[in-house]
Amino acid sequence: MKLIERGLIVFLMLGGAAGAVQAQSKRQSPAKQGSNFVAAKDNVPVKLDTIPVTTKSADARHYYELGMLDYEDLLLIDQGVEYLRQAVKADPHFALGHAMLAFATFDPAESYKHRGLAKQYMAGAAPDERLQIRWLNGAKDGQIVPAIAAMNDLLAKYPNDKQFANTVAAWLCTAEQAYDRGAVILERVLQRDPEYAPALNDLAYCYALGGRAQLAPPLMDRYVAALPNQPNPQDSYAEISRMMGNFEAALEHYNRSLKMDPSFTASQVGLATTYALMGEQERARTEYLNAMSMTKDQPTIMNYNLLRAMTYFRENHIEEGRKAYAELAAEAHKKDFTVQEAEAHRAMALFNPDVKGAFHDLDAARAALAHAHVLSAGDRNTELAQILQTRAYLAARSVNLEEAKAALGPLSEMAQSSRSNVVQQAYHSANGAVLLLEGMYADAVSELQYDPRNPLSLQLLSEAEIKAGEPGPGHEILVKLAGINDERIETAFVVPQVRAALKAAPGSPAQPAATQPAAPAQPAAALTSEIKAPPRSSGFRGGPLD
Amino acid sequence: MRNRLWIVCALLLTVASLAYATDFAVIVHPSNPVRAMTLAELGKIFRGKSVTWPTGRNITLVLREPSQPAMKFVIDKILGIDQEGGKAILTDASRKSASPVVFVPADEDVVKAVEASPGALGIVDVYNITGGVKVIHIDDKQPFDPGYVLKGH
């Protein structure tokens, strides 16, 4: 998460940071965390088995320790970032402090500034500290190859620096989606310290997101046991349970978390979304309202409101949903919440039963970006890529090659120069949509496989596989889709359709989802409406993304 | 708290992440002056048609076992044939002395072998590279560049 820039996740961040601040609890002494600082007075490392940290200021050292403790070990992200800011304020020449702040902050401008300062003062850092700066800076500014080399050199040299290893693994399993590599690192950390709570949490997510969800619950048990009075382990357990389709367990863990800390907003929103996924939309709306009452942060409230509006679409109340989203789009426009405004229009497009109207909705989404006042180029491109990908998807569903090509054009240009995962995957998805419409099914499969976690792409991929004469893999993809339980608008649109289609298919295998809300209205020719059971069985594999 | 943020990051893909998870890196010893080659040239090395570096040193290919899943993609991209065909080419007894191929169990072993051998060329998941090897450009691109040819799914 730490690599996510706030502007890019503003729509669905769901107040995690706010919740983190509210959830802050007892803080351990940083002295127990195994740091390795080099004090100016003696210039001797405190410990030799962790990466050195050089600062001339005792205050900077103290704040850095507190920052790392909060940010990495206690997952109190905002509080941790604030301490890192204080660290570099106390010692403006603190190179690693600047690099860590640049890595951790959600503010792109702040990140850019402190990466520069880290480079400027890097000469004063110890050699291995410079390697860490190279990794931190490279991870943020796109110099990934040398960053990985530095990262692996440090992991080999400091096998006991579990905080560094955990930071690295979290980056691999989130920003890089390199789940196997991240899991290997975390497994090694836990071999050395089986009760290191941050690694227990992170490894569970690494497994779950990497398709080995069945390995996550035992780690969650250990995480809860390691921090029995903290809400976050319960919240994590709830989220993992929900990902696996175990909604009752999710509710139980969310409620335990809220019992420990009634202000733990993340769990309140998790509770609401779980009810939404269970098909209890009225209850979900009530719980979202409760979540809104727990924060004063306006973008966060807007995000919760967008999720609340989605509940109308989830229950096929299209007009009420459109009305709710239109009001939110207008409010977002007034408040300069550009991404939320665009997302509201994109949601309306996906659920618009009239395909021409859907394209108009996407025009409105794009127009919102055009008049943005406070949006970075990167954020704009990210949102634009998603809008264009949605357009290509809807074009494929309505068998409109011209529209699909029109969406692909600008995405192709963006993909030539952008390394952004979002842009690259949106491009491949749109290209796959065009190839599918052109009847080049094998090529469409190859392209759509580049975007394996987006329900829109997965649905098109399934169709391409089937049309390419591979009904088995096509069906497997649908089963995988049916097992996804998350709060994305794409999931809300595609997954109920897929579950309904699988259920209707003759000889279909058992359904993976614990509860199956109603499928949304179809805006165009439903790609999954003619699903037939494959000639060979393909058992459900348990995890939502495996 | 990171739990929720993890989900947002990994599932929603609304991140300024800069990389795919499975790019393959072509690595050589840092002392090797070669900085780039074409995919076609790499194919010739795989086929045993190119056996020496410009310095005259013999090329030793270091790869994971050709039957491993990761190698399917590598063989397909570089040789344009299926895994069995690739295995036949790479294990052809006639090439042993001129352009040897060394098979090792894991990426870590590939990296260690290339770190230790000035004439070696290896292919690994880019997330396993170290500072002891040099990543070379293929068709003017390196891992994570848009359009990089060894970008896996």
Image: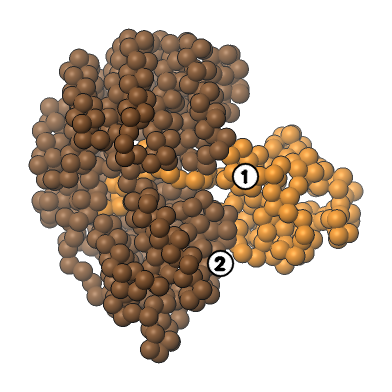
Note the chain letter of the orange one.
Answer: B
* In the image: residue B57, left or right of residue A243: right
Q: Residue sitting at 50 percent across and 61 percent down?
A: A135
Q: In this figure, which residue is indicated by the disc labeled 2?
A: A153
Q: Quadrant of residue B13?
A: top left
Q: Is residue B123 above or below residue A155?
A: above
Q: Residue sitting at 62 percent across and 56 percent down?
A: B107
Indicate the amino acid at tag 2.
Asp
Q: Residue sitting at 20 percent across and 31 percent down?
A: A334
Indicate the amino acid at tag 1.
Ala
Q: Is residue A223 above or below residue A238?
A: below
* In the image: residue B143, left or right of residue A126: right
Q: Quadrant of residue B9?
A: top left
Does label 1 lie on the same chain as label 2?
Answer: no
Q: In this figure, which residue is indicated by the disc labeled 1?
A: B70
Where is residue A449? Give x, y as percent: 53, 31
Distance from disc 2 to disc 1, alpha carbons, whole Å, reads 23 Å
Note the chain letter of the brown one.
Answer: A
- In front of the other: A388 or A110: A110
Q: Looking at the rendering, in which quadrant would you find the C terminus of chain A?
A: top left
Give the SS element for disc 1.
helix
